[in-house]
């Protein structure tokens, strides 16, 4: 193994006193910084993530009546989702700087966008937006839910899809909880017996995981309670 490359090591190897060592280190740092500044390009993640935009729209809907700028920003974000992220009846997962699709949206994308648009549509009494939310909610249920449970993506890496009876929270709220909330908001203004039956059936489906570890299913439990309010 190499020896430690520290001040004492350098001082001993080059027989330098403290003043000379400090002067030498200043010159070395300046030289290295000059080369780095000429050659280094700091990576910039310029993807526009569909799910995150959905959550942002939900947040703006919450502040809709607080400040006019929130309402205008929400309107612009809704239009961006409608025109850029919803393509040919499907959500993309993200788009790059050139507005190119970066793949099909997954359950989280559908759930977050459906929730964001439903919140924004209800707050602004926008029937057109609620109609879009209806399409996205239906697509989310149809693509990712069955009697086997939930799957996270249409594009599975494994030959057989992995299903979950219920989805726990992670760094972000449960996708299942978000879609339940979106569906609940929608059903307050639009009658859809098929969606209502799916929602009721899901809510009545028990799970040992939820019963034994409710802490990990907080947003799901909260969403389920909201269906009765």
Image (cartoon, rainbow, N blue to C red):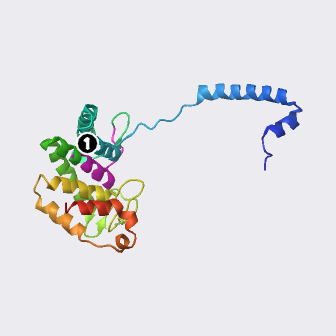
Q: Nearer the viewer, residue 151 or 126?
A: 126
Residue at (30% x, 44% y) in the render: 59
Q: Quadrant of residue 100?
A: top left
The C terminus: image quadrant: bottom left
Q: Residues within 10 Å of mark 1 (few under 14, many from 20)?
A: many
* Overall secondary structure of the magenta section: helix
Residue 114 in the figure: left or right of residue 131: right
Q: Nearer the viewer, residue 63 or 149?
A: 63
Residue at (50% x, 36% y) in the render: 43
Q: Secondary structure at mark 1?
A: helix
Residue at (65% x, 28% y) in the render: 33
Over which residues does the magenta segment extend?
A: 100-117
Residue at (16% x, 65% y) in the render: 197
Residue 13, how many percent across, how many down?
87, 36
Residue 106 in the figure: left or right of residue 136: right
Image height of 11 relative to 162, above or below? above
Residue 226 within the magenta-colored segment of the rendering? no
Residue 39, how many percent across, how many down?
59, 28
Residue occupying the far right of the picture: 15
Residue 104, how many percent across, how many down?
32, 49
Q: Quadrant of residue 31?
A: top right
Image height of 74 relative to 157, above or below? above
């Amino acid at each position: 193994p190499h020896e430690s490359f520290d001040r004492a090591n350098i001082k001993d190897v080059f027989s330098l006193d403290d003043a000379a060592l400090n002067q030498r280190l200043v010159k070395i740092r300046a030289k290295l910084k000059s080369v780095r500044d000429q050659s280094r390009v700091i990576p910039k993640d310029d993807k526009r993530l569909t799910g995150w935009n959905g959550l942002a729209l939900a947040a703006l809907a919450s502040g809709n009546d607080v400040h006019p700028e929130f309402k205008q920003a929400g309107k612009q974000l809704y239009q961006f989702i409608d025109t850029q992220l919803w393509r040919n009846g499907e959500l993309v997962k993200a788009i790059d700087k050139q507005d190119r699709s970066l793949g099909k949206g997954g359950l989280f994308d559908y759930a977050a966008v459906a929730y964001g648009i439903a919140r924004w549509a209800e707050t602004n009494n926008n029937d057109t937006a609620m109609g879009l939310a209806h399409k996205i909610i239906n697509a989310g249920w149809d693509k990712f839910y069955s009697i086997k449970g939930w799957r996270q993506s249409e594009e599975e890496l494994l030959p057989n899809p992995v299903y979950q009876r219920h989805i726990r929270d992670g760094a972000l709220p449960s996708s299942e909880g978000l879609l339940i909330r979106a569906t609940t908001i929608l059903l307050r203004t639009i009658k859809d017996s098929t969606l209502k039956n799916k929602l009721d059936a899901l809510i009545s489906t028990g799970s040992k995981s939820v019963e034994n570890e409710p802490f990990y299913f907080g947003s799901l439990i909260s969403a389920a309670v909201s269906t009765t309010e």
